[in-house]
Image: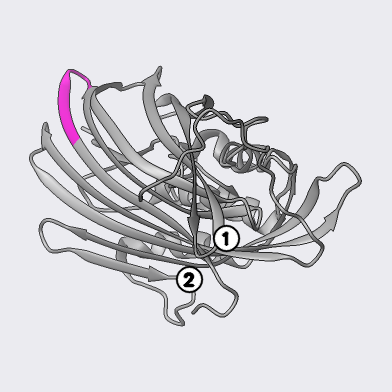
């Protein structure tokens, strides 16, 4: 019978979108034949100093023509499976270096951004000793199952795309390169991507990956973002991410606004019954008020699933750590 892999990923900022896509296809190990990607988690530790009882000034992204920001996302995932098909384990580390540059600022304060995924690296290992490594900048292509992902990684890192974003971080338009659309369509297992294997699907993916700033800030206030994706193998995946504003603190002479997320995921429809037996998450997102940008995030999530196909049940436990960090221009 087919077994299932579930992978988690961040749900913050447009840099996270390729991460969500790769984990729809990532052949972490032979323990799986049909991947499931969880809707992506928020990006995200430390002592904070809340401004109790006082409303803070609204947060906004800073846009100036020519302004650039660089980010590095590191996602570490451990999967343990038991039940039908036997026991198995796998681990994966995904590293994404990305950057965006403001091309123009409109009269309403929105901006047109040129987004690039500069480099992608994947390392995976299974409990039985199998290993694979992919680097989009490597001169030699990998062999074996990892080779299937190489064309897609090359397409993603060689195909910049334009994004229109408001000062609150809302994505209003995405210009998807034809080369990337073709790479999605031709990727082995593209049918399992569902609506992602199209230009419109990729636009939706990027738009949902954005961290939208609240209109106002009050200590203790909460706001929720909801995302949905569809794939033939699993039906609809829904994630509700609730952010709690925790106040501000100073870091290296700059003011950081603190948000704590809570994520609830569920699956409906599809040929398999996927029950979320247990889930938890903890982390923190820092938005740099001084410079008007996302500074860093750290999130740890644990998930236990019971997956039933044709009367046979598989249990999966997933532990994931996702970190994002803003990088200065001269960082390696």
What residue is at 42 percent from the left and 80 percent from the top?
140
Magenta-highlighted residues: 309-316
Q: Which residue is mark 1?
A: 156
Indicate the position of residue 322 as horizontal and vertical percent values. Answer: 37, 51
For residue 145, side relative to residue 247 (left or right): left
Indicate the position of residue 258 as horizontal and vertical percent values. Answer: 48, 43
Q: Quadrant of the N terminus?
A: top left
Image quadrant of residue 202? Answer: top right
**How many numbered marks does the figure carry?**
2
What residue is at 19 percent from the left and 37 percent from the top?
317
Q: Residue furthest right?
A: 107
Kindly identify which numbered label has been placed on residue 136: 2
Q: Is residue 242 above or below residue 209?
A: above
Determine crowd level at label 2: few under 14, some 14-19, many 20+ residues with C-alpha closer than 10 A. many
- In front of the other: 142 or 169: 169
Kindly identify which numbered label has been placed on residue 198: none
- In front of the other: 20 or 108: 108
Indicate the position of residue 124 as horizontal and vertical percent values. Answer: 27, 61
Q: Is residue 314 covered in magenta?
A: yes
Image quadrant of residue 145? Answer: bottom left
- In front of the other: 15 or 146: 15
What residue is at 36 percent from the left and 48 percent from the top?
47
Disc 2, SS: loop
Q: Is residue 14 above or below residue 215?
A: below
For residue 329, side relative to residue 172 (left or right): left
């Amino acid at each position: 019978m087919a077994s299932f892999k579930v992978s988690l990923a961040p749900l913050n900022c447009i840099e996270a979108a390729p991460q969500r896509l790769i984990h729809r296809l990532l052949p972490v190990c032979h323990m799986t034949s049909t991947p499931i990607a969880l809707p992506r988690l928020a990006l995200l530790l430390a002592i904070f100093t809340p401004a109790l009882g006082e409303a803070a000034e609204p947060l906004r992204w800073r846009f100036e023509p020519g302004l650039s920001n660089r980010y590095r996302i590191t996602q570490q995932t451990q999967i343990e499976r038991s039940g039908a098909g036997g026991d198995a384990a796998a681990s994966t580390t995904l590293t994404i270096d990305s950057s965006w540059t403001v091309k123009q600022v409109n009269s309403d304060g929105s901006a047109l951004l040129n987004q690039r995924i500069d480099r992608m690296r994947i390392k995976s290992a299974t409990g039985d000793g199998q290993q694979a490594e992919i680097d989009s900048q490597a001169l030699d292509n990998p062999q074996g199952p990892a080779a299937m992902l190489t064309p897609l990684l090359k397409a993603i890192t060689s195909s910049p795309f334009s994004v229109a974003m408001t000062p609150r971080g809302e994505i209003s338009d995405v210009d998807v390169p034809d080369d990337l659309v073709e790479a999605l369509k031709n990727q082995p297992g593209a049918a399992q991507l569902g609506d992602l294997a199209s230009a419109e699907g990729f636009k939706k993916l990027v738009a949902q990956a954005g961290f939208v700033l609240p209109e106002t800030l009050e200590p203790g206030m909460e706001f929720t973002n909801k995302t949905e994706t569809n794939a033939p193998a699993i039906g609809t995946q829904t994630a509700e991410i609730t952010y709690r504003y925790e106040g501000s603190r100073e870091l290296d002479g700059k003011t950081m606004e603190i948000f704590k997320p809570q994520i609830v995921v569920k699956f409906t429809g599809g040929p398999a019954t996927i029950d979320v037996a247990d889930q938890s998450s903890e982390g923190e997102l820092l938005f740099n008020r001084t410079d008007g940008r996302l500074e860093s995030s750290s999130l740890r999530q644990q998930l236990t699933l019971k997956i039933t196909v044709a009367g046979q049940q598989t249990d999966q436990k997933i532990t994931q750590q996702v970190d994002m960090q803003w990088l200065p221009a001269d960082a390696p």
